[in-house]
Image: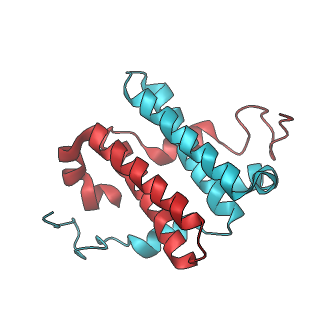
Chain colours: A cyan, B red
Amino acid sequence: MMKQLYLKRDSKRGVEGTFNWLVDEVAELGEELKGCNREATEKEFADVIAWLASLANIMGIDLEKATADKYSYKCPKCQSLPCSCTF
Amino acid sequence: MMKQLYLKRDSKRGVEGTFNWLVDEVAELGEELKGCNREATEKEFADVIAWLASLANIMGIDLEKATADKYSYKCPKCQSLPCSCTF
């Protein structure tokens, strides 16, 4: 969906510019977490994942596959579900 | 899946600590983007979405729903698919 919506603009902006936007959105989420506006917080979560998807799209990385490859119902460190890491 | 894997540990760590981890993971992604190790870059994307999901989970926010509510096959600013914002 993000590809259909924004790939053309994202591609023009490039990797570095899109990463910088992602960083800004993470900062906005951090600010919103200090408040108590749940709806606004949800929108900031949406923005972070949207910009992360934009960045993945312009790099040709499948975000869902990348995540499923690393976290596939087991912790990549202890190999357990749930995670049983002791650190 | 992230809830099954990490909710107990995430809840103990709390919102602020988990947000700080998310920020660290975004910084690691930024570093990886400067290189050319595609597999390592994919893993960093996975880590960012994993920590974002952890943060959403301890706040009881449904990340997928939050995203679908804001970006539902139209740009939230111009209401078009694809986005036709001019700025």
Q: Toward the viewer: B76 or B34? A: B34
Q: Using the rendered image of the protein, determine whether residue A1 is visible from the camera's viewpoint.
A: no
Q: Residue at x 74, y 56 (%)?
A: A14
Q: Is residue B18 left or right of residue B9?
A: right
Q: Nearer the viewer, residue A3 or A18?
A: A18
Residue B59's x, y, as percent? Answer: 33, 37
Quarter holding residue A34: top left
Residue A8: percent from left, percent from top: 82, 54
**In x, y percent, where is residue B34?**
60, 66
**In-image side of B27 versus B77 (left or right):** left
Residue beneath the point at 19% across and 52% down = B8
Q: Please, is residue A78 above or below residue A49 in the view? A: below
Q: Residue furthest left?
A: A86
Residue A15, placed above or below residue A67: above
Q: Quadrant of the C terminus of chain B?
A: top right
Residue shown at the point (62%, 46%) measured from the top left: A20
Q: Is residue A68 above or below residue A29?
A: below
